[in-house]
Structures are given as C-alpha cells and as structure tokens.
Amino acid sequence: MHLQFLGAARTVTGSMHALTHRGRTILLDCGTFHGRRAKARERNSSFPFDPASIHAVILSHAHIDHSGNLPGLVRQGFRGPIFSTHATRSLCEVMLKDSAYIQERDAEYITKKHRRKQLPPVEPLYTQRDVEDTIPLFRGVDYSRTFDVSDGISCRFEDAGHILGSASVAVTLKENGHSLHLAFTGDLGRPNLPILRDPQFIGNSEPIEYLICESTYGGRFHKPVAEMEVQLLGPLRRACDRKGKIVIPAFSVGRTQELVYVLHKLSIEGKIDDLPIFVDSPLSVNVTEVFRRHPECYDAETRELLEQTDETDPFGFRCLTYVRDVEESKALNERAGPFVVIAASGMCEAGRIVHHLANTVSDPQAMILIVGYQAEHTLGKRLVLREPTVNIFGEPHHLKAEVAVLNSFSGHADRNELLGYVRRFNAGRMKGVFLVHGDLDQAEKLREGLRGNGFQNVSIPAQGEKATLQ
C-alpha cells in the first residue's frame, strides 16, 4: 500500500492525496490549486491519473482548495462515492454551484477582453451541469462513526474545528489480519473561535502509525482569538475617519460568518455606530442558511444565539445587508464611504471581490483588510506584500489603499496549536509524519518543532512523491 501526494505539497492549495490499497485508490480531498492563472489552469484542468480509476473520495471539508475540483473529477469520468460530514455535503452543494457560476462568468468577462486583443477565448474549468452530476455522489456521515469505504478500508470523521463540517480523518487499512492506521488532520482550527466547536483529537480510538498533518502556520504565531475585536476596530476607525471604503476579502464559509459575528458585537456595543456592512455574495446568504441547519457543529454560545429572535441574530442585524443582485453589487463601487463590503473569494482570485478591488486599490482613502491566509502568487498575497502595482483582470493598478493584515481571524491552528495537537499522538509508535498544506519554510519550521518533541520520521513530500506504508 502506498500514499502519493498530488496537491498541497510544499504549497497551501490544491489539497489531494491518493491512497492505494489492494489495487484500489481513494483520494483524500480533491481541491483546486490557486496561484498564477496559467499554472493554476494547467494544474486544475488535468489529473495525474485516470479519474474513472478512483474508487472513492474522502473529503475533509468544503473549502474550494479542498473540494473545488470534484466536478472536474466527475467531468472526466469519476463515478464513485464522495464521503463527507453532513454539513460538508450541504455546503458543497451551494459552494460548488457558486464556484461553477463564478468560473463561467469570469471566463465570459476575460473572453470579452481577449476578443478585443484578438486572443483566444477562455473556457471554465467546469460548469454548473458538472456540479449537478457531482452532488448525488456525496454520502453524508456523522462525526465519530466508523464507515466502510471499500474492502479493507474504513474511516472515521472527528470535528476539526476549522469551518462548518470540517473533519480530521482516521483511516484503517486491513490486510491478512493486519491493521494499519493513518490519520489526516485536514485543516485544523483553533480553540475558542467564534461559532464552531473546538477541534477534536483524531487519535483517541486507534493507535495511529502514520499522520498527514497540515502546516499552514507551522512557524508562525497568531494573536489570541480574544483580540479579534480590538484588532478589527483600529483599521475600521482609521478608514471611517477618512470616509474610506473598507473592503474585506473573505471565504464565504466560516470567515464571513466570523466577521459578521464580531461586527455585530461591535455594533451592539456602540463601537462602530451605524457603519453600513454589506456581504456581497449570494453564496454567503445560502451558506448562512446551511449554518442554521447544522447546529451539531456549533459551540453552546452560538447555538443559544441562533435560537433567539432576528433582533439579536448575529447574522441579520440592522446595519447588515446581504447583496445578491449584480446591479446592487456594482452600485457599491459608486457608493461614498465609509462602509464595509465583505466579498468572496478569500484569496482574491475570483468572484465579486476582484471587481471591488479593481475599483478600490488605487484609492488612498480606502482600506483593504486581509483576514485569512493568502497563497503565493495570488492577488491576495501581492496585496499582503504591498506590491506597488498589482494586476487585476490583466490590467495594472497602482496600490494606494491602506492594507491591514489581521491574523487573529485565522481559521488555521498556529505553530503552538499544531504542536500541541500532534504531541497527543504516541511519538514512539509513529512510523511517519507527512507535512502538507504549507509553504516549504513553514513546513520546515514545524518539522523542527516536531523532532524536538520526539517525532523523528517527519518528511515534507514534494508534488507527486510516493510513500510506502507498512
């Protein structure tokens, strides 16, 4: 049996790992790679295997860099089951449709520009029809319940505390009376984040011998979760003082709801007066409804809030407006500040946020708040680096807006939280730890920390690298 790392290897996006046992291959995640447009399109449009040969997919969570290429897999021949938690299935139904819609619209927009330059048209990676063919393949599974994937392979999900429905995965491989246990952290959340339950340890039931661990912030430390409000308030007030627009790129799932939750608290405490807040994402409206349908994922405080009336609903307070209509979205570009607009996607690579940034980055009164990880070579990363000129839709824009980076909002565990989680495994029994979903420098720092805690066989697999499990 062997494990091959086909995505999120020495990088943060495109999570996909192939596990082969008894001649059958299952995928752990099937996400889209984000980066330079040409490279991303090349990586996402083809697979290093025949999709029809894949027996099943085990999906850790619904973020597009983990789930986003499932319709592409189906488009190219995959017909097996996709196992996930119930909440992940619900989220993927709306998120993948939205992803296909955005790809179709962005392809149309860029094709129009190409036509004027006599360049070839651009095709979407997949369409909404492909998504319709994908959703029926999902199989929702409860947390903490063992389920069979195929002969000799069984799995169990535990709450990873990263986004709604996110899971760490325990995989048991059986052959000739012998069992081997593999754990995949997925993306680990942080203790005490708003809304979600804290991460649950995946290693309580089986003696884990191999671990695939994320390393996004393997060498970095976050501000305490308790500082979310203070960290957000300063940039908001600076932008309001100069009557500037406040643009926040955020994932529609998890980060948007956390932002709205904290903004609601600031509003009822009178700290941001009547600052208008627009969530410019049809997906976010649908996602909020999915949130309401899955209280099993929430901590006690959030369940209590969601049971109250609309007047105290943190997802529907007075200053908050959800924007569905395209014309309403365009109108925000002409609206005078101050106001807040939260729009997907979190790495600024697609969707309405790109249009808002095109109309904002050169405005010295404006504020761009970065509240999540930005992968290398994305527009979001170039904003974090404060590059003087950024390309948006192929056109150069001078960056004059203020850019503030708030890491207390991160949904990923930091170095201390990752080390604390992994230390709970039996280092003496562990045959191998594979660090994925992290840039190389972050993975190297986490490897150093793990070795200092007694985990000796820690590797950072390259793209396409295989490991034998025995």
Image (cartoon, helix red, strand yellow):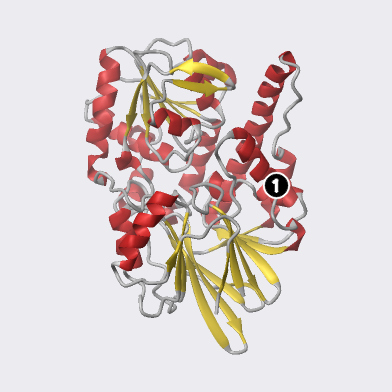
Percent of width and height locating residue 30: 61, 53
Could you tell me if residue 198 is visible in this image?
no
Q: Secondary structure at mark 1?
A: helix
Residue closest to the eye, 225 or 453: 453
Q: Residues within 10 Å of mark 1 (few under 14, many from 20)?
A: many
Query: Which residue lies at the image location 56% right of the left edge and 48% below the top edge?
Result: 14
Q: Against 383, is 337 above or below?
A: above
Q: Residue furthest bottom?
A: 177
- Residue 208 lies in quadrant: bottom left
Query: Which residue lies at the image location 59% right of the left edge and 21% below the top edge?
Result: 394
In-image side of 52 versus 218 (left or right): right
- Residue 29 lies in quadrant: bottom right
In this figure, which residue is indicated by the disc labeled 1?
Answer: 72
In-image side of 290 versus 54 (left or right): left
Of the 4 image quadrants, the one containing the C terminus is bottom right
Percent of width and height locating residue 76: 76, 50
**Residue type marked 1:** Gly
Residue closest to the eye, 292 or 345: 345
Percent of width and height locating residue 36: 57, 35
Percent of width and height locating residue 148: 61, 73
Q: Against 94, is 360 above or below?
A: above
Could you tell me if residue 296 is visible in this image?
yes
**Picture mark count:** 1
Query: Which residue lies at the image location 76% right of the left edge and 59% below the top edge?
Result: 52
In-image side of 137 versus 377 (left or right): right
Of the 4 image quadrants, the one containing the N terminus is bottom right
- Residue 309 lies in quadrant: top left
Residue closest to the eye, 121 or 377: 377
